[in-house]
Image: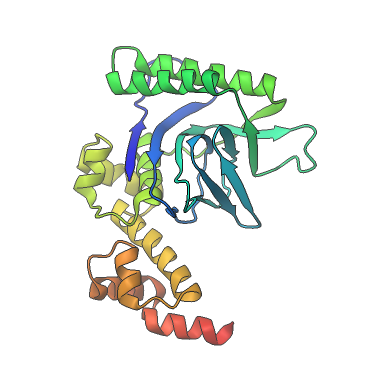
Amino acid sequence: MSYEVYQMKGAKHEKPPFKLLYITHSEYDKGWHSTQHTHHFSELFYIVKGKGSFILADREVPIKENDLVIINPNVEHTEKSNWDDSLEYIALGIEGLFFSQADNKDPHSSLYRFQVDRTNILFYLNRILEEIQEHKEGHELICQNIIEIMIIKLQRDKKLTINQTESPNINKASAFVMYYINQNYRDDLNLNKLAEIGHINKYYLAHTFKKDMGISPIEYLNRVRIKEAKLMLETTDYSIAHIAAFTGFSSQSFFTQAFKRLAKQTPSKYRKEMRANS
């Protein structure tokens, strides 16, 4: 799996009506998927190549190369790669916006999907990636200006209505770490690694995340893993050991301890009860 993620540092200029929290360039193995999750901000995905789908609470939406996908805030979703044609995409987290479309039957649609001009969209996205990678003076302002141009062009070309939203005052470091955990919860993660990946001081990260989310980054990681484990216990016949390894736990015993602490019962008992009630 190839995965590059960059979070935006605070820019020293007048606060814009919305802000870019992060941009990622991700390439996933065949059959990869993230866990179901939500964000308080919107996400924009440009599919560079491959095929896959977005799984929402009520439907599965197929995606393919050159699609631009918009996910509105607070929409539970997960991304899934195709087994035959693995997914590569660039994703942006944008706080403070909600998208709608006048001719859409559902004015509060949770997802929009468009085919876009590849040369045009990659020009903007690559400029943002380059600015953050090079980290030169003024790069935050340049990135913010580029994303504002992209939003205006979307509004004009796709007849989108852009609404400003009241967003919780969550630090960009917290938003970045939440996103990274949701995408990579199966990996061997700890506080030091999360801080290193995000170029964040680990003590600052621990304090800020706990302040924003009410729990530590590692507790959030365990909750994401347990949520996925519950789904696997309900819908598959995989062994407890297999599920523990698949969801990123270092051992079956540690998985059972974490599961019991959060679910108040063992994985085996949870599976038995869920199947008895189905």
Q: Is residue 142 left or right of residue 78?
A: left
Q: Is residue 240 left or right of residue 188?
A: right
The image shows residue 24, relative to residue 243, as above or below, that is: above
Q: Is residue 261 left or right of residue 118?
A: left
The image shows residue 240, relative to residue 57, as above or below, that is: below
User: Residue 16: in sight, yes or no?
Assistant: no
Most extreme residue toward the top is: 137
- Image quarter (top left, top right, bottom left or bottom right) of the C terminus: bottom right
How many labels sit on residues? Answer: 0
Most extreme residue toward the front is: 84
Q: Residue 232: percent from the left, percent from the top?
A: 44, 70
The image shows residue 228, relative to residue 111, as above or below, that is: below
Residue 131 appears in which quarter of the rendering? top left
Q: Residue 260: percent from the left, percent from the top?
A: 34, 76
Residue name at image x 49 percent, y 41 percent = 50
Residue name at image x 48 percent, y 36 percent = 49
Q: Residue 171: percent from the left, percent from the top?
A: 38, 36
Residue name at image x 45 percent, y 81 percent = 271
The image shows residue 79, relative to residue 224, as above or below, that is: above
In the image, 235 versus 52, the foreground residue is 52
In the image, 13 versus 83, the foreground residue is 83
Residue 163 appears in which quarter of the rendering? top right
Q: Residue 199: percent from the left, percent from the top?
A: 24, 34
